[in-house]
Image: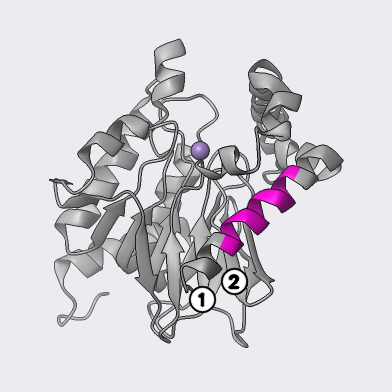
Amino acid sequence: MQTASRSGDRQQRTAHASKTDRPVIRARTVFISDVHLGSRGCSAEYLLDFLHSVECDTLYLVGDIIDLWSMQRSFYWPQSHTNVIRTLLGKAKRGTRVIYIPGNHDCTFREYVGMQFGNIEIMQDAVHETADGRRFWVLHGDDFDNVIKASPFLSYLGHHLYDFVLWLNRHVNSVRRHCGFSYWSVAAFLKGKMSKAMTYIANYERALASEARRRGMDGVICGHIHRAEITKLDDVLYCNDGDWVESCTTLIEDPLGRLSLLRWTEHAEVVSKFDQPEPVLVDHAA
Ligand SMILES: [Mn+2]
């Protein structure tokens, strides 16, 4: 039974957490990007489960949240995608500061930079200060496709092949689920194998880190290339929050300012953590 001192809101959250049988994460900040709502590749169910399992002061939506490109090609919008939007608006209404930094697939929203919709602030980019005083430049990152001259990764794969990989990913994982295996990212596996893609990724990371350094930042937080990572490049911390198409990852800052990457599928796991001795998952009941 809940104690009388707990608010109704919290009771609801606790009830949900026990329903999913997961600890509730208390984060200072959450960064998510590359959700691609409106496309078949979007893992909306995992994202919903994550959003229901986290409490944070600030939520950054770091671009490509809604895939307007894909929706123009073929319209796809299941109920779960509406539920993601509803959950985000609900968080904004209940006191989470929600900042939307549009990416290339939702670049239409860049026309509304500086405005606010349903408590969601739209920004071109942002500077985020962590609890321990470090300053991070937050942006989607597609501008850097031009800086590193085209994208060997995208031209190599091509849009159709990429769609095929996502199709394969869905089917492999529905078979795996059926057989009781957990989620496994086909696209992440293939990307890891391709040296051209690796060169592109390395160039992208270096370009962003050096611009962050030029701006006097301690680090950069971005998305766009669907590859979650926390790595130190010289004196700059490069953080990529990954995506909710293939890898289902998010970057979170705990109350002490420590950053880590979580993968959120059937299992919640910390995939990378920087300078932190203990796990960031905190059980609400504890
Ligand atoms: Mn993008």
Residue type highlighted by circle 2: Leu
* Colour style of the rendered protein structure: one colour
Q: Answer yes or no: is residue 253 visible.
A: yes
The answer to whether the residue labelled 1 contacts the one labelled 2, judged by CB atoms less than 8 Å apart, is yes
Q: Position of residue 35 (x, y in %)?
A: 46, 40
Does ligand 1 reach within 8 Å of label 2's beta carbon?
no
Q: Is 122 located above or below residue 137 in the figure?
A: above
At 63% from the left and 20% from the top, the residue drawn is 159
Q: Nearer the viewer, residue 148 or 115?
A: 148
Residue under numbered circle 2: 237
At 26% from the left and 56% from the top, the residue drawn is 98
Per the rendering, the mark at residue 170 is: none
At 73% from the left and 30% from the top, the residue drawn is 172
Q: Is 187 located above or below residue 242 in the figure?
A: above
Residue under numbered circle 1: 218
**How would you rate the neighbour count of disc 2 (Cα within 10 Å): few for under 14, some for 14-19, many for 20 or more?**
many
Q: Position of residue 210 (x, y in %)?
A: 60, 63
Q: Secondary structure at mark 2?
A: strand
Q: Answer yes or no: is residue 22 visible.
A: no
Q: Which residues are magenta?
A: 200-210
The quarter of the rendered structure image containing the N terminus is bottom left
Q: Nearer the viewer, residue 78 or 29?
A: 29
Please report whichever mark, 1 or 2, sits nearer to the chain's N-terminal start: 1
